[in-house]
Image: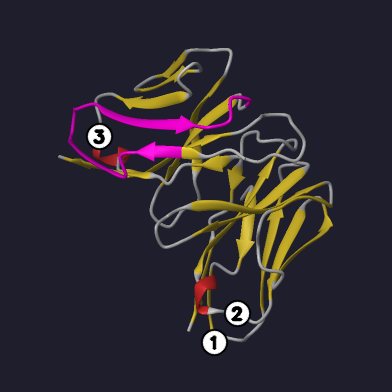
Amino acid sequence: GENVEQHPSTLSVQEGDSAVIKCTYSDSASNYFPWYKQELGKGPQLIIDIRSNVGEKKDQRIAVTLNKTAKHFSLHITETQPEDSAVYFCAASKRDQAGTALIFGKGTTLSVSS
Amino acid sequence: DTAVSQTPKYLVTQMGNDKSIKCEQNLGHDTMYWYKQDSKKFLKIMFSYNNKELIINETVPNRFSPKSPDKAHLNLHINSLELGDSAVYFCASSKTGGGGELFFGEGSRLTVL
């Protein structure tokens, strides 16, 4: 089955700096790679996703890149703000294949200090 | 309107007891899931139902029994609770089965004493 590794487990940055979180996946058939943000006491919420037919996607301060050959994908947050502090999860799945589910990495706790 | 709602939000109980967590989604989604988040924040899939049919059943002790009375509801019943069952249990739904975008509930924190 799919295995997703995520690094680093904790990341501390100053406000305004960039933050990068990296993930690798094991199943070359995976084709969907979302990123979730979990704030304290809340459920994870999708912030951006990318499919395997795309190499990069951007949404304001957030971008995701995918390298299918190397089986890794990354989340980039620019101009970080204190409200970006949260736990971030990467995930992978074979989207639209019955009987599959998102498999998550172990999470990265991002702390942005002002 | 809450999209995916779970009750109760907090549950404290003694070892050996039986407890249930309820989940409802009003998104019209076909697929619902239970994920377990341990103390290290690791999110692990437990079960998935598509239109009331069980489609994913990960390696979970048979003390855990999911039930889906209709496609908008997925409940989790746990028998003979153990200390290791302490965790946050998240219900989620997706429009279709098969690894698409998940919408999570707020979680149910279970503490077994």
Which circle, 1 or 2, is nearer the viewer? 2
Where is the N terminus of chain A found, in terms of image quarters?
top right
Magenta-span inclusion, residue A10: yes
Left or right side of B90 for A18: left
Q: Mark 3: which amino acid?
A: Gln
Closer-to-camera residue (A99/A57): A99
Could you tell me if the residues under marks 1 and 2 are in contact, i.e. CB atoms within 8 Å?
yes
> Badge 1, how many Cα within 10 Å: few under 14, some, many 20+?
few
Q: What secondary structure is the magenta-colored segment mainly?
A: strand
Could you tell me if the residues under marks 2 and 3 are in contact, i.e. CB atoms within 8 Å?
no
In which quadrant of the rendered view does residue A84 lie? Answer: top left
- Return the residue at label 1: B14
Closer-to-camera residue (A46/A90): A90
Closer-to-camera residue (A25/B50): A25
- Return the residue at label 3: A81
Q: CA distance from mark 1 to mark 3?
A: 42 Å
Mark closer to the chain start, 1 or 2: 1
> Badge 2, how many Cα within 10 Å: few under 14, some, many 20+?
many
- Return the residue at label 2: B81
Residue B113 is situated, as x and y percent measured from the top left of the image, at 48, 84
Q: Mark 1: which amino acid?
A: Gln
**Which chain hosts label 1?**
B
Where is the C terminus of chain A found, in terms of image quarters?
top left
